[in-house]
Amino acid sequence: MIHEKGSYYLPSPSYWPIFGSCALFCIMFGAAHWLHGVNWGPPLFFVGLALLFFVMYGWFHHVIQESLAGLYNKQVDHSYRWGMAWFIFSEVMFFGAFFGALFYSRISAVAELAGDSTSLFGASALTHYLIWPGFMPHWPLLHNPDPSLFPAPKQVMEAWGIPALNTLILLSSGGTITWAHWGMIKNKRSHVLIGLLLTVLLGITFLCFQAHEYITAYEDYNLRLTSGIYGTTFFMLTGFHGLHVTIGTIMLIVILFRAYLNHFNSEHHFAFEAVSWYWHFVDVVWLFLFVFVYWL
Amino acid sequence: MVKRIPILFLSLITAPIYAEMKVNMPLGVTPLSHDIYWLHMTIFWICVGIGVIVFGALIYSLIKFRKSKGRIAEDFHEHTLIEIIWAVIPFLILIGMAIPATKVLIRMDNTEDADLTVKITGYQWRWKYEYLDQGISYFSNLATPANQLNNKAPKNKWYLLEVDHPLVVPTHKKIRILVTSNDVIHSWWVTELGIKRDAIPGYIHETWARIEKPGIYRGQCAELCGVNHGFMPIVVEAVSPMQFAEWVKQQTQGKVTFNTDVKLTLSKKELMGRGETAYDTYCAICHKPEGTGMPPAFPALKGDKILTGKPGDEIAIVLNGKAGTAMQAFKNQLSNEDLAAIITYIRNAWGNDDKNKQGPHAGELVQPEDIALAR
Amino acid sequence: MNSIEHAVDQHAPYNSQGFFSKVTRWIFTTNHKDIGTLYLWLSLIMFFVGGAMALLIRAELFQPGARIISPEIFNQMTTFHGLIMVFGVIMPAMVGLANWQIPMMIGAPDMALPRLNNWSFWILPFAFALLVSTLFMSGPAPNFGWTFYAPLSTTYGPKSTDFMIFSIHLLGLSSILGAINIIATIFNLRAPGMTFMKMPIFVWSWLITAFLLLAVMPVLAGVVTMMLADRHFGTSFFNAAGGGDPILFQHVFWFFGHPEVYILIMPAFGVMSEVIPTFSRKKIFGYKFMIYAISVIAFLSLLVWAHHMFTSGIPLVSELFFMYATMLIAVPTGVKIFNWVATIYKGSVTFETPMLFAIAFLFLFTLGGFSGLMLSIVPADYQYQDTYFVVAHFHYVLIPGSVYAIMAAIYYWLPKWTGHRYNERLGQWHFWLTVISTNLTFFPMHFLGLAGMPRRIPDYALQFADFNMIATIGAFIFGFSQLLFLINIVRTVRGKGPHVSNQVWEGAHGLEWTLPSPPPYHTFSSPPTIDECK
Ligand code: HEA
Ligand code: HEA
Ligand code: CUA
Ligand SMILES: [Cu+2]
């Protein structure tokens, strides 16, 4: 009946979601206790994390089996596509919140604290004169309004060193994954494998560079999360991006294996496409980061 | 049953009439509050008008087109022109509302050419008033006695709306008001002045008032700021410019300078008496009159280890506060005598002076000199 | 059941034999009707929990100086009441309705991503467990209002704030997954012939709501993440000493928060657009314009957030912009109201319980809308902001708006879902008690606010005593009247009422009314053809 033309596919009841919820609960409950220094917090957190990975493995495994068994028709494929596309949209909005914080701080908050009356919104200059008379506006901030609470960094991140290189790396990884997609459409397995492998390697290189950059920032530049709003936005934005690159790389590795196992053909390769969308999304976010966090 | 409800309420309403029932915004005593009142009423009546039309049409339809009256539904369900009409008419009404609103707003924004500048700082849970030109500065605390709060005494007329030191300002002068905060967000609101300004820590926002009528105007903090948000009133006393000048003179003469090194020794009785009053004003809001606090957020002072040990630590805490907690620095709020009295009081009250239970240092006195040294 | 072969045919609910399989039926279910039912029960339970908290608040406010709960507990109760009503009552109820109705209304067998659907629901109980657990911890529970403004919730927040933060992360995740599912279902599972412009307005309103959810829930996740970082990792998003700004919190929060209130009302608009035509026995007037109106409202709702921050000292130009944008929302909302009135006009109206609630909606929601419009006038908002006038406004739009719509929807569709008629007499009693007590509770709050009573205070000056007393009495009547609702639902679900046919209501149109009552476990195993169902 499933294979009848025009009918729908309905999955049977599944225990993965409830385990997923339990995992999330353990993670959150554990993390909160961890933050409060309760000693069973971290173990609970990691148990939850492990359970979550197990759920993801099991759930995806199940889906892959169904897909390989040919249970999915075009309609299911479309549902997954819409699902992934809108999921990425929600991620865009998540980053949007942090970019919003960056823009707001730069354009409005810092200007107001510095009594910069040329600021777009014409803030009260008294904030500066009465509360923060010593604070000078200059982005990226090398002084903070209250240096005793938020010691400023010695130096800021230069755009044209590692970050520029990383831009190149991510852009070319976008190229390699597209190249792999062409291979997929033409049913050329080795072409796909090489393309994916290159993408994975580029992703890992990117992460290594970023790790290096963070270490420099912390050790040499004294640029930290605690360095005031510049450090705050810098690390939160690049950090969340880095996390997404990590997730993307893991997903790419999974897809690489699946490609190796011949899970895809020129018609059926939604998983591949979903990951490549995700990768492109991460790529575009990076471009914004490069321009607004490092460069301008 | 349903019919009897209004009667029930009438009897309830007439029971305890403490003050006249107010159902509308007061007109207020500043140009801004007048503008606001006028806008409020205009928009209110426009809404009433629209309401009469919409509800009228609705009630008419509901009565006229009942099935029980044998009505059969007609078949029409589209009319583009009418849709456009009933989108455009409200739009025009809105423009009519927006114009005066914009005018008033622009007027409110102009804080220039002020005769007097007052800086208002919100603290958990009191207000600090600073007259920047006159060099006067003081705190304003809730003055409702604890026994009224606890229902142990009948409540007086201005229950929860009375303070120890009101903000005193002259009438007929443009007063520029700067609002900020020391800890969390508060909001300085006095209805009759037409002013509500949020107090944002680290930022100053401005507004202004020109009071046209002498009198006492009351308000409250209007932004949730912690447990005692409801106990943070504002009282503004508007007096004639002459009286105001007089008041300023008094204030600057009898000005307390906190850092004077008073070589003065007070008796235990003096310390305890003065300490209790000051404690009830400044500390009891958090630590409670019985010293029980509200643990765990606000520690109990009764039986507190710090207070029963050698004097020293508690002096530092009270002087400098504890960063990041509601425990603020009292260095610049209280004189040496007051601080000595408060600390002596909390070291001796509630059985904290029981040497058998609390150890040898319990109940030791603290003198203004000790405070001066610790400053 | 994990294996593929079984996946093919096991569609009926298990022959629930034994306790274990009865429980697992609900926990493992991938059926939209089961999941819809779960959502609705969760919502009903939370309604009583959040409502009991409101009653505690009202009890404390019965008289000045009442000391039933301490100010600390009072603040926790307002916080929880707000959070639970918004995230635990209205949102789950609306998603529950969506789950039941959307597949039936568009001719789909189920939701597009049934396992994800299960997950969206089953995250919720865990999220609420996380939230509610803070009430039982040693320190204070979250006590800074449902808007958790920084720095009261960051530097000065109690330890339990972190649990709230993580709980909100989970709630956000659940909503995002739910919204994705709804969009995928509507885009992809419409029966052949069910074009977008033939879809019932309820489905349309949910489609647009789902977009809004996707646009703003991640921003909520973002803002709580910033809070977490400020609390524990030394960042300074909301701290001027490091170059941040507490107002930034409000901007980000309300970028979520304002669309959120429209998320609460738009499915309600959808319900109204189903109920009113049915009981007027006349097609909805201005179908197209209804859809344009919701779209415009959704779009504008993303541009008006700072109307919650007029007193916070934002610059003049932004105040003007946000005032104009906010006022504009009255236009599409007005179009909706007028179209509903026009639907009733020259119809053939009967007054069953769902219709009564719909009529009350028309009156009282409009009233709440008017006070909203007054709030949007910046200078006037300087007086209204953070007073009981605002409390009156939002209870008028939330209770006669969202809550009445949910009640109307339940009365309207429950016979379809269960195959039994609810008790009409009980329904009518419930309705009248509810409307009267709603007004008794919330109307006086307008006066209180105008006379100067701030919100979120546990004790107040003597001049506010009378109206508060009335409000408290009204609240208790309201609260206990809801027990009638509960009784009516339980009776119907347990099969007490008379059986109904497919076409439960004389004037109802739409695919769901072509199905038997109750509909089979899986509705359309192959797509129906749509000829003239709209
Ligand atoms: C269901 C939820 C809901 C809905 C639908 C609305 C609808 C509206 N709200 Fe409301 N609002 C809330 C929920 C909602 N609100 C909540 C929860 C808060 C408080 C949050 C908190 O602080 O805790 C709040 C607070 C709030 C404020 C902030 C107040 C303050 O804190 O100072 C403002 C200010 O502009 C506002 C405005 C509006 C407006 C203009 C509308 C409009 O959409 C209303 C439009 C409708 C009409 C106007 C009526 C019908 C129209 C006609 C009949 C046409 C003709 C009419 C005219 C031309 C006037 N709301
Ligand atoms: C959809 C949302 C929604 C709903 C339905 C309600 C419903 C009610 N709300 Fe409100 N409310 C909010 C959303 C909502 N609320 C929000 C967002 C806030 C802002 C919070 C903040 O400031 O942060 C708020 C704040 C708020 C306040 C202001 C608190 C303050 O500022 O200090 C008040 C005060 O009267 C109040 C009252 C009520 C009452 C009486 C009801 C009634 O309708 C409730 C009806 C009661 C029941 C349904 C209970 C039935 C239960 C029983 C009969 C069982 C009884 C059993 C026992 C007692 C054991 N609410
Ligand atoms: Cu200060 Cu509320
Ligand atoms: Cu809003």
Image: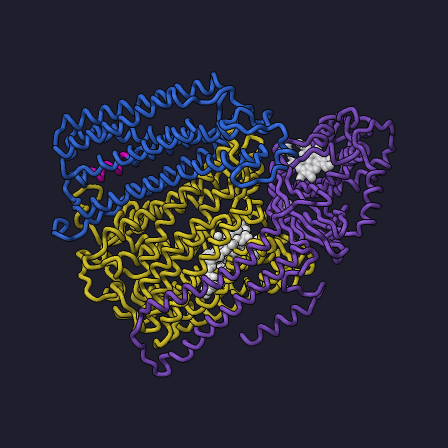
Q: Nearer the viewer, residue A220 or A162?
A: A162
**Residue B127 falls in which quadrant of the image?**
top right
Residue B215 vertical placement versus C276 (above, below): above
Question: Does the segment drawn in magenta span residue A250?
Answer: no
Count the labels in the image. 0
Which residue is situated farthest in the top direction here? A220
Q: Nearer the viewer, residue C275 or C312?
A: C312
Q: Position of residue C415 (x, y in %)?
A: 32, 66
Tell me which secondary structure the magenta stretch mostly adopts.
helix
Residue C52 visible to an observer of this rendering:
no
Chain C as rendered: colour: yellow
Q: What shade does chain B have?
A: purple
Chain A pictured colour: blue
Asked whether residue C136 appears in the rendered view, the answer is yes
Residue A133 in the image: state x and y as whole percent: 63, 30
**Residue A80 in the image: above or below residue C229:** below
Q: Which residues are magenta?
A: A57-64
Q: Residue at x 20, y 46 (%)?
A: A76
Q: Is residue A177 left or right of residue B27?
A: left
Residue C221, by quadrant, is top left
